[in-house]
Image (cartoon, coloured by chain):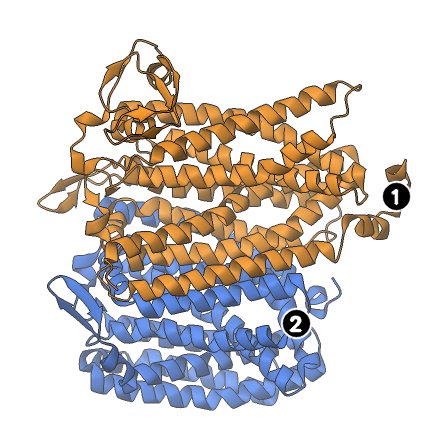
Amino acid sequence: MEFDTVTISRLITAMTLTFHIIFATLGVGVPLFISLAEFIGIKKKDKHYELLAKRWARGFVITVAIGVVTGTAIGLQLSLVWPNFMQMAGNVIALPLFMEVFAFFFEAIFLGIYLYTWDRFKGKYTHWLISLPVVIGAGMSAVFITTVNSFMNSPDGFTITNGEFVAVNPIEAMLNPSSPTRIAHVLGGSYLTVAAILATIAAIALLRKKGAADYHKKALKMTVISMLVFSILTAVAGDTSAKYLAEHQTEKLAAAEWLFETEENADLILFGWLNENNEVVGELRIPGFLSFLAHGDFMSEVTGLEVTPEDERPPLVIHYLFDLMVSIGFFLIGISFLYLVLSKFKRWNVHNKFMLWMLALSGPLAMLAVEFGWIFAELGRQPWIVRGYMTVSEAATSSPYILHMFFLFLALYIVLGTLFVITLRKLFKDNPVELELEKHYPELEKGDKK
Amino acid sequence: MSYEIVGITVLWLFLYGYVIVASIDFGAGFFAYYAKVTKRDHIINQIISRYLSPVWEVTNVFLVFFFVGIVGFFPSTAYYYGSALLVPASFAIILLAIRGSFYAFENYGSKQSNVYMFLYGATGLLIPASLSVALTVSEGGFIKEENGVVSLKYLELFTSPLAWSIVGLAITAILFISASFLTYYASRANDKPALNLVRRWSLFWATPTIIMALTTMIFLGQHNQRHFDNMLDLWWVFGLSMGFFLIAMGLLYIGRNYGTAFIAIMLQFFFAFFGYGAAQYPYLLDPYIHIESSVTNESMGLALIIVFIGGLLMLIPSLILLMRLFLFNADYAKGKK
């Protein structure tokens, strides 16, 4: 079979990242909600929240395990599959990679302590305090890794003279122009996605009516409020991220918005497709809105794709990824807002079938948005691995065994994914909330049934 | 001291840390399976799982630390080792993944199945075997670079007595370190039957470890004369290593001070490991990566060292807390908490 190593290198990395990002997102977000639940539980003296924290933590252990192994995989794969890129990265952007390991180390230590010390401290807040380094460590990991990815989009902090890196400034490379907005978007998006997934779990439990309704309603309320907060923050961060693109990485925005010619008062194109003459058809058009989104002014000029040399343009398919991500984002804002409005009025049942179904959909949709967002970010940088300096084909390995490795890892992820689902199901099926409430908190049972 | 020396010392220290903590973990996997097969699992598996469950993620980070750090300090290692080790390192990743998920799926999920116990035991021996390829390759002669393409000479590697003796040394050392640690842990937990069992294992594995170490020395002398001669110049370092080994053996044999015995074993490996590393100077990959010419630029080197010191100031207290809660807390070890 004919294949070229660059394509397989891209595929193997895409596969690893697509799989890893699920667990990385959960890894960043879940600790925040465990910590929040435990805190509310102590404050309100409500055992339901304590149990929430415990059960989320139990599930979290499994996701962390897969996050660790796939994270180790991608960490090593970067050197194995992209040796030339890592040689360059080592010179300029090694600092945040190094810091990420520290952040994770820190998180891992305290996670170990947190999980095994539920009843070992006298003060109630002592155990909760241990959750904070986990939350911070998880968040900082995301921050550091995002700066590396941002560097690939907007390399900064060095100059090249005769093929050598000179005047390297590791801090400047880390805090490159696109870092701040992307960090905000990644963090916000992770918290939003995890809130949505936890809401999905509660909503499905309520739909199945297996009992412990109070417990699940509290979980739902807490996670949906978080969803609203983080979906708005993520949207704002996404907007500033797009404004950054309009300023510094015009080809990415132009390809995402199908803006082929530079234009004033540019329309925002939603979905649609391209006919054989490369004209947009079947789209939704919002007049002047792209100019407004890009520069905050309906009459402003937005740079089109024509200024970028043809062989340096990203693939146009990213338009769909971008639109899908944004659509899901607005769906999440809408549904969580609707939930809050309904819950303010006692007359309407906020836990009606429709609401619960919509909330049950939120989690999977949010995770899809994360995937779309990352694929958009990565494809939108093509053909570069470090924009303006190194292309993916220059960076890839030349090893002929890369195809074999692709299938090896494919098999690994299939096995890991399957075992993950089986174990989680087992873990929670063998020990349902109702049973655990009855066993450990018999005093709550009565209140639950009224 | 120059950046490259600070850098490689720090990285070597982390690799040493990984060798110790991972050996305990890998060996424990093998012993757990062996005990199950010989129907003695009720004696020791409680001890093993109580120690390993809270610390396994920490073990993995030592390794990640090493390979991220070495790319930072010596970027050309990514190019040479990354290109050459695609296959062996990918296998190591797969094995680490199987092992890592063992904890998640078995310990938290369901009761122990034989298949998974087998994989857990087997990966404990196969991971060090596949990782040790990196050490073998560093001796030179196993990599070729043609037209800018770096590749591994598989035939030379698989037929090299040096490669196989390093694999053998890795496995025997792991079993020896692990058994000695479990001896100490069992004595902390005051678990007599377990103590007797693991102490016997520890005494048993000492001999093959030393035999493999000497065998490796001999083959190294045939393969890389420079490295071998440098090691002979550092004879006193290896002498110290041997001295600590004898102290540990004495204590294990008499049957007292298991904590001191384990520390002596840690020192034994510390001196051997650093003697071996120092003798490899000035190469990180003979003859392609020379430590002085491959070091990263000054500002990155400085930044990495500052972060490293800051990181340690944060990590050391946390690690001490972790150890006090689990490792050195006698009640926890006994299973009371």
Image point (46%, 91%), residue name: B207
Relative horizontal placement of residue A61, taking residue A126 as reference (left or right): left
Residue at the image position 61 percent from the left and 50 percent from the top: A60
What x and y, as percent, mark residue A261? 22, 21
Q: Quick one: which residue is furthest to the left in this view? A: A162
Percent coordinates x, y for residue B24 in the rendering: 52, 73
Chain containing mark 2: B
- Amino acid type, residue under disc 2 in the picture: Gln
- The reply, left or right, for residue A7 in relation to residue B27 is left
Could you tell me residue B135's position as x and y percent? 31, 73
Q: Determine the residue located farthest toward the front in the rendered image.
A: A276
Work out whether residue B176 or residue A277 is closer to the camera in this orientation and state it.
A277
Question: Residue at position x 64%, y 42% from top?
Answer: A34
Chain A, colour shown: orange
The image quadrant that residue B220 belongs to is: bottom left
Q: What is the CA distance from the residue labelled 2 to the residue labelled 1? A: 33 Å
Chain designation of label 1: A
Q: Which mark, by number, is residue B112?
A: 2
Chain coloured blue here: B
What is the number of the mark on residue A445? 1
**In the image, what residue type sits under mark 1?**
Glu
Q: Residues within 10 Å of mark 1 (few under 14, many from 20)?
A: some
Name the element at disc 1: helix
